[in-house]
Amino acid sequence: MEVFAVEGVPEVRPGDDVAELLVEQADLQDDDVVCVASTIVSKANGRGRSLSSYEPSGRAERIAATIEDIADEEKDPRMAQAILDECEEVLVEAPFILGVTKFGHITVNAGIDRSNVPGADLLLLPEDPTAEAEAIRDGIREHAGVEPSVIVTDTSGRPFRLGQRGVALGWAGLSASRDWRGEHDRDGRELEATVQAVVDELAAAANLVTGEGDGGTPAAVVRDFDFGDHAGSEQLFRDPEKDVVRQALREWSHVRD
Amino acid sequence: MEVFAVEGVPEVRPGDDVAELLVEQADLQDDDVVCVASTIVSKANGRGRSLSSYEPSGRAERIAATIEDIADEEKDPRMAQAILDECEEVLVEAPFILGVTKFGHITVNAGIDRSNVPGADLLLLPEDPTAEAEAIRDGIREHAGVEPSVIVTDTSGRPFRLGQRGVALGWAGLSASRDWRGEHDRDGRELEATVQAVVDELAAAANLVTGEGDGGTPAAVVRDFDFGDHAGSEQLFRDPEKDVVRQALREWSHVRD
């Protein structure tokens, strides 16, 4: 399996055709997995925002004040409002805002980016990353006549472990997970690790070669990845009612109120 | 960057030299990152256990009964005892046991494996995966005269997102993370995603090619990974007192008691 960055993609502007920009820079193949940073998808979709367009609610003011108070970090109430607008549910208000985006992804600050956003203060995540992955896949087919899989990726922190890692937000052309249920080990015992989140692992592999900052590239290709002969699962985000940690955070927040 | 499985590693037995088994099957190079499944490290270290060697405490009996009750899943109290023995702290007792291993890794069932363990009921995680990674690295140098980096890996679930993914438990020869703090985006703004957990991303990439079960291989090599000119950080597990989710789980458990 080979992983390489797509070099030479220009700064993306609202209205740009991401698929076209990618096929101009990379000779894609049918079995490739193309990992595309959500930043360029958002830029093409015009998801840049200026802080001045947000009118903070009382809740946003209160959250910003609490964060300033307990995290000793300056928090613009308009930024808090932008985050609230992107969240279906807020799990933790302080010392950071941990929320569930409308498409089900749980991350700090609703994944809103404040770096690498020319001409805007903020860059929101795409509204529907799986629809975007499908559209990019269709566009690649149209422009280059090949049909690779596409993953829209982000970098995100996580509980328990320090640091960010690449994650999948949306995907097209492959399943989210390899499902090993019913398969057996060498001794014939049923396997315990039953579902493997391959789209997240592919996003993590891509993140190793793309990098951040002024030397960063917004896309990478995974070539010769073999999904193998396994059942697939399309669900990547846990069912809220079965997610014990999410439930615990929700109940913990209420206890603190 | 290339990622390939190390094929042909035989079933590992207590006392085996993992480094020797690896260099017999793969032509390793200085800049490689060798990702070794913790299962074979544990097997070489004699970490297989039989359930009958555990005498369940009252707490283990209570936890097993609670899990049977609320998760409708048969739980052997001796298994609960094995998990308690491996944990420095238990964060959630039911519907599953989520604990912190003595080396700081937070995972369900203390990462104890019940598949792929010939001649034993259980396989415990290595006691000190970073020391094991260092020992394997030393062994590879001794046997093959090259000095690749080594990561001892596992697969593990996570909050919020379904499925398992590869993670690093211990590492040698490279830093846990790339630290981007102080670096800038194309517009000169300071970067927000400041620490990238590369050892976890490498473990995830490796997991894409190794697989589970009877066709699985216990090691993979990442070749031509470029860490780049960044500061490194050695810490992968969050400081307990700064981990909001861990604190919330702890307080939530007390509320439920």
Image (spheres, coloured by chain):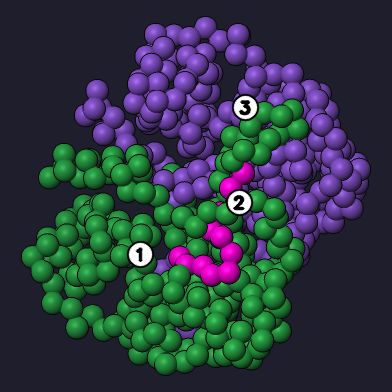
Chain colours: A purple, B green
Q: Assign a secondary structure to mark 3.
A: loop
User: The numbered mark 3 sits on a residue in which chain?
Assistant: A
Q: Nearer the viewer, residue A61 or A139?
A: A61
Q: Amino acid at mark 3?
A: Arg
Q: Nearer the viewer, residue B178 or B105?
A: B178
Give me the residue at 74% from left, 59% from top.
Answer: A3
Disc 1 designates what residue?
A: B103
Q: Amino acid at mark 2?
A: Ala
Disc 2 designates what residue?
A: B231
Using the rendered view, name the quadrant where residue B60 is placed: bottom left
**Which is in the foreground here, disc 3 or disc 2?**
2
Tell me: B212 left or right of B143.
left
Dot 1 alpha-carbon crowd within 10 angstroms: few under 14, some 14 to 19, many 20 or more: some
- Circles 3 and 2: CB atoms closer than 8 Å: no
Tell me: B48 left or right of B82.
right
Query: Disc 1 and disc 3: Cα gap in Å?
Result: 35 Å
Q: Quadrant of the C terminus of chain B?
A: top left
Using the rendered image of the protein, determine whether residue A56 is visible from the camera's viewpoint: yes
Of the two numbered discs 2 and 1 on the same chain, state the one appearing first in sequence: 1
Tell me: A253 left or right of A123.
left
Q: Is residue A142 placed above or below B203 in the rendered structure? A: above
Q: Is residue B159 magenta?
A: no
Image: magenta residue range: B169-180
Q: Amino acid at mark 1?
A: Phe
Q: Is residue A61 placed above or below B18 in the rendered structure? A: above
Q: Quadrant of the N terminus of chain B?
A: bottom right
Position in image of residue B219 (x %, y %): 58, 77
Give me the residue at 34% from left, 71% from top.
Answer: B112
